[in-house]
């Protein structure tokens, strides 16, 4: 089996080692004998929904977001078609914000978004920085915790009826008040969690791989062979404890 990945703007949107998420997915696929082919999709490059099983985009400062926003907006229709067609997606922080309708920075200037996720973002004065811990239930009855690090000025507002990625146990999350973090739309996930996210949350890496594999085969998400995640579990425990002890303090 082969999973084809489209990595949006790797040269612009890659802070807090977000690129590390691709390395985790590639290794965990490889350890199960799954081919994992990554293609960069930059400014001016087309998005062909039929050519990808997974789309990834990292985070970035306002400056980098402004450099790619017009191009990302032009890719909006293809990205919406991809997600509607079952392509998996992981979008982090600045990338997550620009997959919504718009990101308005703290000076009031508005960056158009791709209109893929049901949300918009408005920057506040104070940045929301620190360790975060969420409770997620991506599969009914299967509750898991997600640990990471956040640093954003943006306050993301989900549309009425939209599904958050998780409930905030410690940290700020989307806006510091709703108690929610991230957004989920089918196989597409948006989140503020950096770190990178996936090394300390292998269950989410496997969930994303299984969703992408389902798109690649046209079947159901496969149950992937378990791996020895003892190191990852330790990293998760350390990150969770840090979030509980100091997350979410302005
Ligand atoms: N520039 C955006 C903000 O400040 C996103 C930051 C990020 O990707 N960490 O909210």
Image (cartoon, grey):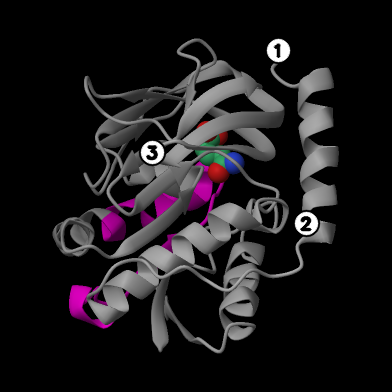
Q: Is residue 41 visible?
A: no
Of discs 3 and 2, which sits in the foreground? Answer: 3
Of 22 and 1, nearer the camera is 1
Describe residue 44's horizontal placement relative to residue 121 as left or right: left
Q: Is mark 2 within 8 Å of ligand 1?
A: no
Q: Quadrant of ligand 1?
A: top right
Which class describes the residues within 10 Å of circle 3: few (<14), some (14-19), or many (20+)?
few
Tell me: residue 105, above or below residue 226. Answer: above
Q: Secondary structure at mark 2?
A: helix
For the C terminus, which image quadrant? top right
Q: Residue at x 23, y 47 (%)?
A: 116
Location of mark 2 (residue) = 232
Q: Secondary structure at mark 1?
A: loop
Location of mark 3 (residue) = 140
Which class describes the residues within 10 Å of circle 2: few (<14), some (14-19), or many (20+)?
some
Describe residue 55's horizontal placement relative to residue 10 as left or right: left
| Residue stretch rendered in magenta on the structure | 45-72
Asked if labels 1 and 3 touch by Cβ distance under 8 angstroms, the answer is no
- Mark 3–mark 2 Cα distance, whole angstroms, equals 24 Å
- Mark 2–mark 1 Cα distance, whole angstroms, equals 29 Å
Which class describes the residues within 10 Å of circle 1: few (<14), some (14-19), or many (20+)?
few
Is 47 contained in the magenta span?
Answer: yes
First in residue order: circle 2 vs circle 1: 2
Tell me: residue 241, above or below residue 219. Answer: above
First in residue order: circle 3 vs circle 1: 3
x, y percentage for residue 233? 78, 51
């Amino acid at each position: 089996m082969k999973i084809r990945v489209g990595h949006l703007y790797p040269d612009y949107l890659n802070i807090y080692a977000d690129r590390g998420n691709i390395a985790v997915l590639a290794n965990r696929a490889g350890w199960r004998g799954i081919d994992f082919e990554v293609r960069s999709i930059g400014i001016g490059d087309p998005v062909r929904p039929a050519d990808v099983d997974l789309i990834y985009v990292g985070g970035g400062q306002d400056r980098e977001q402004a450099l790619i926003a017009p191009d990302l907006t032009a890719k909006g229709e293809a990205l919406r078609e991809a997600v509607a067609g079952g392509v998996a997606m992981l979008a982090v922080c600045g990338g997550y914000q620009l997959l919504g309708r718009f990101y308005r920075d703290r000076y009031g200037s508005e960056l158009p978004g791709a209109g893929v996720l049901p949300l918009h973002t408005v920057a506040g004065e104070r940045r929301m920085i620190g360790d975060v811990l969420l409770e997620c239930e991506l599969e009914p009855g299967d509750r898991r915790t997600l640990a990471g690090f956040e640093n954003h000025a943006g306050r993301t507002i989900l549309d009425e009826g939209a599904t958050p990625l998780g409930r905030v146990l410690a940290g700020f999350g989307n806006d510091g008040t709703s108690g929610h973090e991230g957004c989920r739309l089918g196989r597409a996930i948006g989140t503020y969690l950096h770190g990178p996210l996936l090394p300390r949350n292998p269950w989410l890496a496997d969930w994303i791989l299984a969703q992408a594999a389902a798109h690649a085969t046209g079947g159901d998400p496969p149950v992937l062979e378990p791996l020895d995640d003892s190191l990852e579990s330790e990293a998760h425990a350390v990150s969770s404890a840090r979030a509980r002890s100091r997350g979410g303090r302005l």
